[in-house]
Image: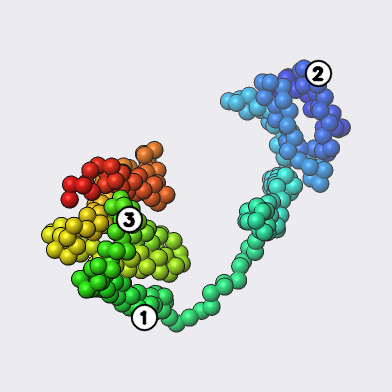
Amino acid sequence: MADDATVDFNGTGRTDETGSVATAGLSAGPVASDDSGTVAAALSDSIPVVAATPVTDGGSGMTAVASADGGEADAVALAASDAEAELAQLIRPKLTAEPAEPNEAVEVVGGKVETVEVSKHPTPSIPETDLSLADIERRRSHPLRWAAMILIVLVAIVVPYWFGRSLAVNETEAVVSALGGVDPRGIALIGWVAVVITYVGLAMAVVVSPSWPWLIVFAVGLAGEQFVAGLSMLNLNFWYSTYVVYGEQASLANAANIGILAAAIGIAVYAVIFVGLLVVIKKTSPLNVLTKSWASFILYFVIETLALLVVLFGGLLTAV
């Protein structure tokens, strides 16, 4: 390989067998050449000039220039290492103190979706406290409100039923004269509506927050349903009680009882179907939409409508 490349130690030109000349701003230094005719220099301008002689490696075919002085060779190697370190610092990408992208978030501001900057280190909005999680939950439980609601429900069950039953027994003629001109289907519809309002109020109180407006609807609907049930003498064998109290006008009371029972049966059927859907349908199934709250309400009203149609046009009003 000594004939493949010619090195000019007195100048800056280096010529290989291909005729290409490379200019290196070096005074002297080790040079290596391989079979492809590539010549590499490993020293910078700051390296001192030393006397060197070419040395050929017979095993690899590489030709290099070695220093005559061992100490100066160590200095050359140290300078080469420093040059490589400086080059690495120059080509290394600089890290910026600030992130490349701003710390932003998408929020709804004034009814419009906007991109706003957020703090990288937000200040906690919840003050430090010694209260435990149980203490916090106990403060949110509001036991007095629940006690008052339970009391209101008990009153709505007992008092309206007692009042309606008292009117049926003690003021029978007044009740018959007031309702004598009403079609039995209308009476059945009243009983059905009372039960539906009661259930809707209870269901919405569970789903919607705040729940107290719907709890009021539930209590009012329950009181109305119980009043109609007391007025129509509702029990398991209501047709005997209504015949004893109302005589020939018992069909009106029977219609109210049938309307109430039809709505109650509709709630039971809906509950069985909805629980069955929750058990059978997987969360990954497209049919999982049937378990959503809005879909369950639609299902409930469909079932209740079918129950009402059976009562109004199924012949039950004339059979009892």
N-term-proximal mark, 3 vs 2: 2
Identify the secondary structure beneath mark 1. Answer: helix
Left or right of residue 54, residue 211 in this image: left
| Residue ID at (61%, 67%) | 122
Asked if marks 2 and 1 touch (Cβ < 8 Å), the reply is no
Count of marks overlaid on the render: 3
Out of 30 and 67, give the one closest to the viewer. Answer: 30
Out of 263 and 201, give the one closest to the viewer. Answer: 263
| Residue ID at (44%, 61%) | 208
Q: Can residue 40 be spotted in the picture? A: yes
Query: For the residues carrying marks 1 and 3, which lies nearer the camera in this image?
Result: 3
Structural crowding at the residue carrying mark 3, measured as other residues with C-alpha within 10 Å and reported as few (<14), some (14–19) or many (≥20)? few
Which amino acid lies under the numbered mark 1 shown in the image of this protein? Leu
> Marks 3 and 2, Cα distance to the nearest angstrom?
119 Å
Q: Is residue 69 above or below residue 172?
A: above
Asked if marks 3 and 2 touch (Cβ < 8 Å), the reply is no
Structural crowding at the residue carrying mark 1, measured as other residues with C-alpha within 10 Å and reported as few (<14), some (14–19) or many (≥20)? few
N-term-proximal mark, 2 vs 1: 2
Which amino acid lies under the numbered mark 3 shown in the image of this protein? Val
Query: For the residues carrying marks 3 and 2, which lies nearer the camera in this image?
Result: 3
| Badge number at residue 19 | 2
Q: Residue beneath label 3, please?
A: 182
N-term-proximal mark, 1 vs 3: 1
| Badge number at residue 144 | 1
Identify the secondary structure beneath mark 2. Answer: loop
| Residue ID at (70%, 36%) | 66
